[in-house]
């Protein structure tokens, strides 16, 4: 007979690989896992396929792997948890000895805990599991010849039940080695930017390149038993793929889904994460991985800083803004009703992986938002950044632009140099706040619905006008702010009638001292300085220049 003896389907965590390997041993045959085949064909981890090419491409590769295995493999085959979602894959399985390994919701929660590809906003893994299973159960049943429940059974008992159901005899001879493999690789040509350890913290590296997720296990290290992957709703599949890869590396890996954007930066979401870590038994040697934009990495870092008073964390930024700014430097935090980033901690990551492929799926407005922080790095320190943007403003709006990697790397180097000498913002680090005093006031005024970069863009024009009116900045450089920011599509003005509220909001800015407002202004490009307690009339006049 050709084709596999047994094909196992079922949700993640049900034990397909453990039972599959046992079955292969008992039948004297080989075990094969289509996930491992996909990894081998693509030459990268599943999470990287999601990053680089998206879920649709992954399902295509998976269908091809299933087709190849069905044609050539004669042992035990197991399919990924979501394989049955693909109609083509389901058609391939018709008439085959497919076994659906099922488990009830309580068992799933017990075995997998909070791991799920579904939203977990209500701290209710049971409900999430129920929804996941409701969506998939009929598909598993559609392809399966028989269903074997795994609840309250050991892997040996499950294997026995499958052999009985399919009436397959056990083999008594030699065991054939398993064919499992999963070898994610890091691509050549990765840039490594070192951040020095200061204030008693360890040094770490920011990697910029492609296919970097293979670096995760090394960064997580051997001492960790558990890993929590925090990701936003928009990256649900990617987050789950990263979790699955880490689970395949032997970590007890959970995924914690956060709301998108600023909605994640709340104390409720942080508390939800603490609850998830507590329920998972997260200890001081365990590690948090933040996969997402700046909002996600800010929360991941803050949860890492606060859990057990500090556990290690790794940032996997997936937006331009997070790569060049938020994920680097160890500022972590959440917003409160009173202001932006008012609660937080300085808690540097153990490493930062900037996988440029992640940017391909980023909506253009989020991409452009990140350009504000890149342009900020240009004005405060590296004028080549401004030249590159001005040379091709349209290219600067897309990851396919000719200078994408250079702009990102240059901006990271600016930040790296600053935070390497002043982690806790005792002085120099304040320059990174250029444009942020007004920006944060606008974000609060907009109830955190605005993109950070859009607010920073207006904030920088305001700071440039403030510098000009204070007699510090020349006209040409002040005007250059408008030109370069507008050229990539960033806003330059805000509602004129909001000044009193904005002024009030700015009072809680972290650079304020007592009643003294403090702003970063420029004496010229690459010459940031502090302007303390400017005359209220000058402030108002500067605001007049950005009022719509
Ligand atoms: N800690 C710091 O030093 C620092 C520095 C700068 C900014 N920040 C913070 O960063 C936040 C802004 O970060 P941001 O601009 O990355 O926004 P974001 O984190 O809100 O992400 C923007 C949106 O894109 C989605 N997304 C993320 N990656 C994606 C991808 N690859 N494909 C598709 N969608 C994706 C997110 O879910 C979100 O909806 C703000 O909260 C800001 O205060 C912090
Ligand atoms: O890293 C810093 O320091 C910065 O100020 C970078 C800013 O771009 C960033 O928005 C930061 O989160 C602002 O910090 P805050 O202390 O003003 O909240």
Image (cartoon, rainbow, N blue to C red):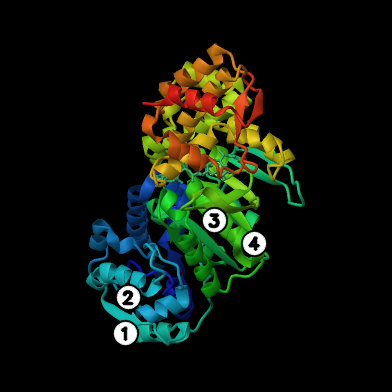
Q: Which residue is mark 3?
A: 300
Are the residues tagged 2 and 1 within 8 Å (C-beta)? yes
What distance separates the C-alpha of mark 3 from that of mark 4?
A: 11 Å
Circle number at residue 311: 4
What distance separates the C-alpha of mark 3 from that of mark 2?
A: 39 Å
What distance separates the C-alpha of mark 1 from that of mark 3?
A: 46 Å
Circle number at residue 165: 1
Question: Could you classify mark 1 by the number of other residues whose Cα lies within 10 Å: few (under 14), some (14-19), or many (20 or more)?
Answer: some
User: What percent of the width, then of the height, locates residue 116?
Assistant: 41, 66
Q: Secondary structure at mark 1?
A: helix
User: What percent of the width, then of the height, locates residue 248?
Assistant: 52, 64
Q: Which residue is mark 2?
A: 99
Q: Tell me which numbered mark, 3 or 4, is placed earlier along the sequence.
A: 3
Left or right of residue 261, residue 383 in this image: right
Check mark 2 vs ligand 1: CB closer than 8 Å? yes or no: no
- The quadrant in which the N terminus is found is bottom left
Kindly tell me whether residue 245 is visible in this rendering. no
């Amino acid at each position: 007979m050709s084709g596999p003896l047994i094909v196992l389907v079922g949700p993640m965590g049900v034990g397909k690989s453990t039972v599959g390997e046992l079955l292969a041993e008992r039948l004297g045959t080989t075990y094969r896992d289509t996930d491992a085949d996909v990894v081998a064909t693509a030459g990268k981890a599943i999470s990287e396929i999601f990053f680089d090419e998206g879920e649709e491409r992954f399902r295509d590769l998976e269908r091809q792997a299933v087709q190849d295995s069905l044609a050539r493999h004669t042992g035990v085959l197991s399919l990924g948890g979501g394989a049955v979602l693909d109609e083509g894959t389901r058609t391939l399985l018709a008439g085959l000895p497919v076994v659906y390994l099922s488990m009830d919701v309580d068992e799933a929660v017990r075995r997998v805990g909070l791991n799920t590809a579904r939203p977990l906003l209500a701290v209710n893994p049971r409900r999430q599991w129920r929804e996941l299973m409701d969506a998939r159960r009929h598909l598993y049943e559609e392809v399966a010849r028989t269903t074997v429940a795994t609840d309250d059974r050991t892997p040996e008992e499950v294997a026995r039940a499958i052999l009985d159901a399919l009436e397959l005899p056990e083999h008594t001879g030699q065991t054939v080695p398993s064919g499992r493999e999963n070898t994610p690789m890091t691509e050549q040509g990765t840039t490594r930017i070192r951040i020095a350890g200061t204030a008693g913290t360890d040094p770490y590296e920011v990697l910029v390149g492609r296919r970097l997720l293979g670096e995760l296990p090394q960064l997580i290290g051997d001492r960790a038993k558990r890993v929590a992957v925090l990701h936003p709703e928009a990256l649900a599949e990617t987050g789950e793929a990263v979790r699955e890869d880490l689970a395949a590396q032997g970590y007890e890996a959970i995924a914690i889904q956060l709301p998108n954007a600023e909605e994640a930066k709340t104390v409720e979401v942080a508390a939800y994460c603490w609850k998830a870590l507590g329920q998972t038994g997260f200890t001081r040697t365990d590690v948090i991985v933040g996969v997402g934009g700046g909002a996600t990495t800010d929360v991941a870092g803050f949860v890492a800083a606060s859990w057990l008073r500090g556990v290690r964390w790794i940032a996997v930024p997936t937006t331009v803004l997070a790569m060049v700014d938020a994920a680097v430097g160890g500022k972590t935090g959440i917003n409160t009703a009173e202001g932006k980033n008012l609660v937080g901690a300085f808690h540097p990551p153990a490493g930062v992986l900037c996988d440029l492929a992640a940017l391909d799926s980023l909506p253009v407005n989020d991409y452009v938002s990140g350009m504000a922080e890149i342009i900020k790095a240009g004005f405060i320190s590296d004028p080549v950044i401004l030249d590159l943007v001005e040379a091709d403003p349209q290219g600067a709006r897309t990851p396919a632009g000719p200078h994408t990697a250079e702009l990102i790397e240059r901006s990271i180097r600016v930040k790296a140099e600053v935070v390497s000498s002043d982690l806790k913002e005792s002085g120099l680090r304040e320059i990174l706040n250029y444009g942020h005093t007004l920006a944060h006031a606008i974000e609060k005024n907009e109830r955190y619905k605005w993109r950070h970069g859009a607010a920073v863009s207006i904030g920088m024009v305001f700071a440039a006008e403030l510098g000009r009116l204070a007699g510090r900045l020349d006209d040409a450089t002040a005007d250059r702010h408008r030109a370069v920011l507008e050229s990539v599509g960033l806003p330059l003005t805000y509602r004129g009638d909001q000044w009193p509220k904005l002024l009030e909001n700015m009072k809680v800015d972290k650079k304020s001292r007592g009643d003294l407002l403090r702003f970063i202004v420029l004496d010229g490009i690459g010459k940031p300085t502090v302007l303390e307690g400017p005359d209220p009339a000058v402030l108002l006049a500067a605001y007049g220049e950005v009022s719509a």
